[in-house]
Amino acid sequence: MTVPIAIIGAGIAGLSAARALHKAGHTVHLFDKSRGSGGRMSSKRSDAGSLDLGAQYFTARDRRFVDEVQQWQALGWAAEWEPHLYNHKNGQLTPSPDEQTRWVGSPRMSAITRGMLGHFKVEFACRITDLIRGEKHWHLLDADEVSHGPYSHVIVATPAPQATALLACAPKLASTAAGVKMDPTWAVALAFDTPLETKMDGCFVQDSPLDWLARNSSKPGREHKPDTWVLHATSAWSRQNLDLSKEAVIEHLHGAFAELMHFPMPAPIFSLAHRWLYARPSTAHEWGALTDADLGLYACGDWCLSGRVEGAWLSGQEAARRLIEHLE
């Protein structure tokens, strides 16, 4: 019997590695502490419809990723988003058109990772806390002290601070992951009964607690009623207000949004806040993936490369490539 490969984290990096390994004929088992796949590319179902609280869109530059995204589009998992973009600086709102192609999951951001997940064996709501290396194989211990295994190799595909603890048996890898600083982001969603009177679908914000805002309902496949908006705070504001109550965060960011729009804003009929503790790495790296081939332990994620969706996908591919190469 073939011993499967364990992948911890069912976000874009973990699923990218899983699909590459599956294509090469390997069996994979995925674990994720959340109730569903996607990580920061997940969507939140709410009374106001489905909301993209994490990744707002993504771009494709590397030829391999361009090809992959085109496949997602052909499968109906992704669509091009062509927003009316604005810039806000020094109190001024100005149109900010560009030639950049922006992609989103359709009909919600999580459609991509749901599609990638396919029929893989996956344990959701399962937080792996420890990796135990035996003579030949790995076993994983979860937060309820249940053991999973055996596995021939392990790929850790979580944000760097969570990966650090899991990589403890490979001190060099753990030390590299521990050196990665990741920035937090507070996200707020607001819904309005009557659409806000603006052409704006997205805005890059400066000189404000806000960093970005988007009309969620302008994305392809989304519900148009109510009029939903997603606001992202800056990393600096989020870090300073990390432990603020969700109610206070909504109040602050709704206020910053109203100030920026220069017109009386109606009261929202729905609001929610979500804190991304590890939204993105502070700086880009060029590791591709981290490897201890002798132990059979690998790590991947956006933090190994650019901090973008593309970086996460490429990092998963690289972890899988190195693992396969070591087996040959």
Image: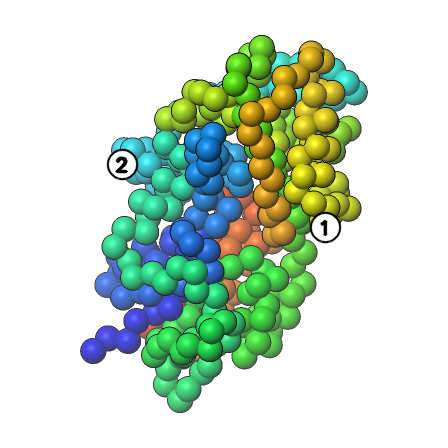
Name the residue at 31% across, 65% down.
Answer: 28
Name the residue at 59% across, 24% down.
Answer: 268
Depth order, front residue of 267/35: 267
Q: Is residue 277 visible?
A: yes
Q: CA distance from mark 2 to mark 1?
A: 41 Å
Name the residue at 66% across, 42% down.
Answer: 246
Depth order, front residue of 44/138: 44
| Residue 225: percent from left, percent from top | 44, 20
Place residue 201 in its image quadrant: top right
Q: Where does label 2 land, which residue?
A: 75
The crowding category of the residue bearing disc 1, from other C-alpha atoms within 10 Å (few below 14, some 14 to 19, many at least 20), is few
Give the mark nearest the N terminus, 2 or 1: 2
Depth order, front residue of 139/306: 139
The crowding category of the residue bearing disc 2, from other C-alpha atoms within 10 Å (few below 14, some 14 to 19, many at least 20), is few
Q: Is residue 230 visible?
A: no
Name the residue at 37% across, 26% down.
Answer: 221
| Residue 121: percent from left, percent from top | 29, 61
| Residue 127: percent from left, percent from top | 48, 66
Helix, strand or loop at mark 2: helix
Picture layout, residue 321 above or below residue 5: above
Task: Tell me if label 2 and label 1 are in contact, CB under 8 Å.
Answer: no
Q: Where does label 1 land, which residue?
A: 243
| Residue 31: percent from left, percent from top | 40, 63
Picture layout, residue 196 above or below residue 229: above
Residue 106 vs residue 101: left or right?
Answer: left
Please name the amino acid that badge 2 sits on.
Answer: Leu
| Residue at far left of view | 1
Residue 212 vs residue 26: left or right?
Answer: right
Place residue 139 in its image quadrant: bottom left
Helix, strand or loop at mark 1: loop
Please name the amino acid that badge 1 sits on.
Answer: Asp
